[in-house]
Image (cartoon, rainbow, N blue to C red):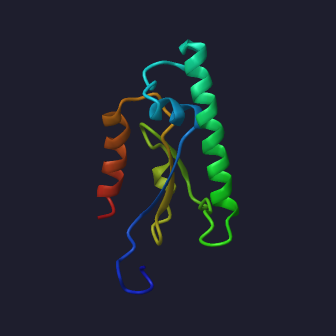
Amino acid sequence: MDTEGLCEYRLGLYFVCDGIVGARRTLGYAATPYDQLTDTQRDEVDVLVNQINVRNQRDFDRDVERLTRPVAPLLLIPDLAGAEAIDSTQPMAIIDTSAEVNKRDMALPVAKLVAQYV
């Protein structure tokens, strides 16, 4: 879109999350560590993790608009240490949201990072 003049590139963010953490969040078990879930809840998480992995692999393998992980610094929520390594000519970062933090503590550092580029 940038090359077509439809927008101006400022910052690229690619978000990743551990499958078990993401599945727990999706299923409403974010506040409960995996090893403290009931057997039924762990089974639900495991099934969803498998579905996520299959979907992600399909996204990486598809013929059209294949998902490609960028070459960029990996920043960990909540402190985003390593942000100084972001290339200033075409800034891009991979944000790992796997930390066991609340939504505010996850979003605020990302918002502050974005504010530096807009």
Dividing the image into 4 quarters, which one contains the N terminus?
Answer: bottom left
What residue is drawn where x is 31% and y is 49%? 112
Q: Position of residue 108 (x, y in %)?
A: 31, 42
Q: Tell me residue 45's x, y (percent).
A: 58, 28
**Relative height, residue 77 to residue 100 (above, below):** below
Residue 110 in the image, given as x and y percentages of width and height: 37, 48
In-image side of 56 versus 14 (left or right): right
Nearer to the camera, 68 or 95? 68
Q: Nearer the viewer, residue 54 or 88?
A: 54
In this picture, residue 103 sits left or right of residue 57: left
Locate residue 97 relative to residue 59 in the image: left or right: left
Q: Quadrant of residue 34?
A: top right
For residue 69, which quarter of the picture?
bottom right
Quarter placement of the C terminus: bottom left
- Residue 25 position, x and y percent, is 46, 32
Position of residue 99 in the picture relative to residue 109 (left or right) = right
At x 47%, y 70%, the residue is 90
Front in this rendered view, residue 81 or 47: 47
Residue 12 found in image quarter: bottom left
At horizontal 53% and vertical 34% (from top left) the residue drawn is 23
